[in-house]
Amino acid sequence: MTSTLIDTTIYAAISEAIQQEAKRILTDGQVSTIVGYAAARRKGSAQPMIITDAADADKLIFTPACVNDLVVYLTKAKKDIPKKGKIGIVVKGCDLKALTGLIGESQLKREELYLIGVPCAGVLASTFAPSQDLTEESIAPKCTECDAHLPTGCDFVPTETPLTPELEKKYAVEIARLEALTPAERWAYWKEQFSKCIKCYACRQVCPFCFCEQCLCDRNKPQMVETTPRPAGNTAWHIVRAMHLAGRCAGCAECERVCPMDIPLNLLNRKMAKELKELYDHEAGFEVLEKGPLTMFNEKDDQSFIK
Amino acid sequence: MHPAKQKHTFEPKIIAFVCTWCTYAGADLAGTSRMQYPSNVRVLKFPCTGRIDPVFILKAFQQGADGVLVSGCHPGDCHYIAGNFHARRRFAVFRKLLEFVGVDLNRLQFSWVSAAEGGKWVEVVTDLTEKVRNMGPMTEFKELATEEQWSGAINTPELKEAFNAI
Amino acid sequence: MSRIGVFICHCGENISRTVDVERVAQEVGRLPGVAFSSDYKYMCSDPGQTLLKKTIQDQKLSHVVVAACSPRMHEKTFRKAVEAAGLNPFLCEMANIREHCSWVHENIEEATVKATEIVGMMVERVKKNRVLPTITVPVTKRSLVIGGGIAGIQAALDIADAGHEVVLVEREPSIGGHMAQLSETFPTLDCSQCIMTPKMVDVANHPKIKLYTYSEIELVEGFIGNFQVTIKKKARSVDEDRCTGCGVCMTKCPQKKIPNKFDQNIGMRTAIYIPFPQAVPNTPVIDRENCTKFKTGKCGVCQKVCGPGAVDFEQEDRLIVEPVGAIVVATGFDLYTIDEKPKGSPIKGYGEFGHGKIPDVIDGMTFERLASASGPTGGKIVRPSDGKEPKQIVFIQCIGSRAREKGISYCSKVCCMYTAKHTMLYHHKVHDGQAYVFFMDARTPGKSYDEFWRRAIEEEEAVYIRGMVSRLYQKGDKIVVMGSDIAVGVQVEIEADMVVLATAIQPQKGADLLAQKLGISYDKYNFYSEAHAKLRPVECATAGIYLAGACQGPKDIPETVSQASAAAAKVMTLFSKDKLEREPIVARVREAGCVGCFACRKVCAYGAVEEKEIRDRQGNLIKVVAYVNPGVCAGCGTCQATCPSKCVELDGYTDEQVIAMIEAL
Amino acid sequence: MQKYISQQNLNTLLDTLIASGTRVVAPRMNAGTPLYEPLTSSAEMVMDQLPRRSAKEAYFPVCEDIMTYEKEGQKVSISDIDPARFPETVLVGVRPCDACAIPVLDAVFSWDYKDEFFLERRRKTTIVGLACTIADDACFCTAVGLSPADTKGSDLFLTPLEGGGYACESYSDKGEALINNHNSLFNDPNSAASLPLAQPYMEKFDLKKVKAWLDEHFEDPSWDAIALRCVGCGACAFVCPACHCFDIVDEGTEKAGKRRKNWDACGFWKFTHHASGHNPRNQQPKRYRNRIMHKFKYYDDKFGQTLCTGCGRCIRVCPVGIDIAQIVEEISKKLE
């Protein structure tokens, strides 16, 4: 493959630093549990791992295959993690944004967490095997637009600094391409994409912000959204989800990564983020906000679209 | 059967979501003033535009609406202090989403119509009806509603026959 | 399956002229769940309502749809009728086929099709209607009045006279407010203090009024009928129970040159003081910033001379919690000043008038103190700079008011009248003096008001010049007033001895902070907003809180007193029942699904959403969910549209009802 | 019956079938994703990628109507769906890991209750299998006792040959009929060697030992270790060729609607969620346990078969890297 390699040599040192820090905080009892990444069976692959024993700290790694946003393990809907004392968690800059949003939505308390931040040059796209090298081609689309290579406000961050080449912003380019189409062409594009959806709800289940205990789309009295994985129900589901994430999603792109049908779901979320930036100068995930852009207003908000 | 409807080849279905204090009352005023407007609109009354969920708009299109109107109190007039301000943001964002998935925003109108603006109600409803009438039926969601996953499809010879006959 | 009864009204011919009501009844009769469908000439008439009630019983109807006029017209009528027949009133809906159909369409076919669909929609809606019981909340029959000016005093006295306890809180050491500062009042020129002080004494003596002066509102919790108000009683340094009000302490206090705010800082007072002789309560307060004892630790003369031993240097601020059922806000006004404003302030000062640095340019309230018999000059009108009597005096109206370039666009309403009054007072006291008034318009609507203004010109020899002043400056001991007379079209220049500015009325400083504590809304000037400009001018949108006086907007005394009595009447109406009944259109939280993200609380304009802990049987905390206080909820439903999992639902407008209507189309 | 068919003739066969109104389902690209879908032309067929979803939807649809209702006044009328209307289908290019699941599913859908919807679609579907030449490190068909050339489930089986074309052999009347009806397109078998077949990396599991351990360990702390990280989506079940749970939902309005049969997955929190609010599988590890138990114990108990063909799809799509092959391998070693 001729694509330019992205330097990930610091990941080895980062893995080591994570292991040492994990061992230290588990040993001295600062945390009871750590959510991190560990190597998996398939070549080069990684998986989320939840450890409670300092002896397991050596298993923690950071590699370009460490794609998951582990913050999802802290939300209520997935509350099976034992809760005794503080939880330590390994977070990339993008994951940290989700965590920040969740604090603003009363789902997490900062003081109950120990954040191990990861300086990150990028991770692999879901369409590439975990054994692939990280290159400008194989890098996850979200990483081409990353503005949080170095997480801030963590309890511990390894000192390494990632080399981050300027990359073509893949979502921005694709959004611009779609925006230039006619409504009918855009409808055709999304219709084809949504036709593949089988409502496995992987997008919902990995999303840190889909923390509802009872998803609106699982309800049948009334049935706001058809649950059957038919084209009509699929389209409604993805529209409703994008709307619910508007102003909240900070772009971890997990929905898109996990979609077994390769639906570019994060495009919807990035489009919403772009609009909220333009309309209300809102960017999600940088600070804990008392109110999100759709739970507040300004009397002078744009109303040029209202007669 | 409906001789009057032959005036136009297409009569759009317009659904209006309105607040009870301003726009519904404005529509009442249009009535008491005996103003005339196209009969295509069906009004759903809410206490406040703040209560109107974007899902309702989506559902309306799915149920066959060719155009949707959302209308409430002018900024500052909200009976509930700020419901219309929240609605304004919500719909500013939602319409951008619909546009991005390929809905022609000419089919989705927002307006402020006060209890005193019977004339404006007539104007908004008439304009939207005429605009949508010229655009033709909203086929996107209706087509979706009839589509099935290929795997669940069944032979429908009579439908096929009817289709071939066209 | 439901047994719905549908009644199609002809409304004489109002509906049946363009809607084929029989056909509508027939077609609607075929809808699933409809057990009875019929048309009738006048459903709202007595026979119509009797038919409705009888059919409900005969046909054992479960729900009712009346297709007639707008629900804004007759929904109450039919719901009452339905209730009389034994059904919950909220199982009845109206389909508007008159205002929204027969009156706006001429074509019978089109109107009939539309009417059928409208009724069909309401049939689907009513199927999902739930029995809604009326909500009742207990009422604490005590009232809080914030502000001890004439508005607060009037409201407090009215409520107390009706037999209900009142807690009156005043920020200053004495009640009385601005009215106590005035010399005479328009249009009758009766002495302000003569009519004010008896009311102040009534307050002090009223067994039902609990007075907190030198106190502020710290925190307001709860809702209509059930507020908990925390009051901060600032340290007075004088024990109110022991003090006899003899005043020896004040005569002995060595600090005698402290500008008295009550006298607009032209009179002086001591460090231990009462703001004015008729103060209520007649208990001094120590101004700790200027007291030698507090500044240096030495002195303490007042304590030594106090017979009853009332002076207490150790006294601390105290917090007191008072339960009340209603709140009257009567915080009054403050005056605009022409001095330079902080950078970025939306309100600007008057550099062209010297930013308030010319000593003999005073505002109207200072003139009141000069003219007042109990004022610092004993009623003599003299210049603050040298004590000389001004022989040429210029009054300038609309300073700050109606001045968009200065950031205030409203009219302060009282200035035209009080300036006219000032010219008269001046003329009465300085017989050889001449008063000039620069004015834009004279706004004198009100009983005997215009007559009063004309008297100032015609009998009291005030010269009114229509035009604005462009500049003021000091020249020797004169003040040169440069203006224009637009009636004649000439520039005017007057060398005045004194200039009186009719400055704009503004809300009290900190009005916004108090509003935030109360959870009431305010406009961009910080005037408090009423629930409806026309029909609910006394109530706040927040239930149980009422407005009186100039905190809502500029008002004169009779208007203020009227509104205070109106607010009192509203409070008494609330207190007339032991329990408060309200329409059950309120939001409810489905606790099982709520994840406690509190998006609902973020959008609630009424502060109706609270936190509620869910615990298991052992008392372990399971989760914290939202709880909507039905006493506070106004029923807008913004929370429901915001809730991502739809775990808060507005009764009467549930998603089920709305979706059923959309699906009916 | 053994035959040879060239690529060109295979294409002609498919185009002929399509033209005759038969539904031809084969791997094709849909918006960048390989899926088994009806072809409009043989040119759409892609043979070098494993479709993302299994072939099961040809006879066990993602969703299908099973009844419609209409209401008027106080009356309700119901109409059934007539299985006779299911279309004749030829399913082409089915990998052994998909085809081998078909007899496994036949067992459950024709057990005590005969599922007419499934069985009628099965009757009307001819399966043309394809020997597998592609494997990655998620594949483990050999580990569960199958092979890349396994012909179970196929009516006709194609083996790609060096130099192009396919060796084909029929294994049923349906397969034979397909050859006979289009005889001219098939030639006599030739001696060309088959292309090198896929070689999955995993060693064969001792499935008896796996079942033996599962028999005894319904409650076991290792379930937590295995599935605490499961986030509860249905991706694994939906891409699986053998998972066959479904949910019945009524969808529609007050006036009319449909009863539908949709895929369900044991990963969902709503799976076995009772109307009372109680859920016997109230935690994710309990739900994941059901997935393993069903595949390697319950199904074996009832039908003597394993409900896993080692296609590796669930491993590839799992958002959190849960690896069923690794889990089963570890279980198989637990009793050693």
Image (cartoon, coloured by chain):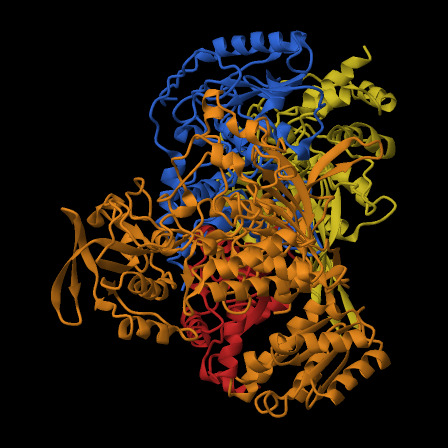
Chain colours: A blue, B red, C orange, D yellow
- Name above or below for residue A46 compared with residue C17: above
Location of the C terminus of chain C (image quadrant): bottom right
Left or right position of C490 against C349: left
- Name above or below for residue D198 compared with residue C602: above
| Residue C137 picture location, percent across and down | 74, 56
User: Which of B115 and D43 lies nearest the eye of the viewer?
Assistant: B115
| Residue C174 picture location, percent across and down | 53, 46
Task: Please say whether residue D192 is visible from this viewpoint.
Answer: no
Task: Please say whether residue C197 is visible from this viewpoint.
Answer: yes
| Residue C471 picture location, percent across and down | 17, 53
Location of the N terminus of chain C (image quadrant): bottom right
- Name above or below for residue C358 compared with residue C569: above
Q: Quadrant of residue C89?
A: bottom right
Q: Quadrant of residue C544?
A: bottom right
Residue at 37% x, 53% y is C365
Outermost left residue:
C490
Counting labels gives: 0
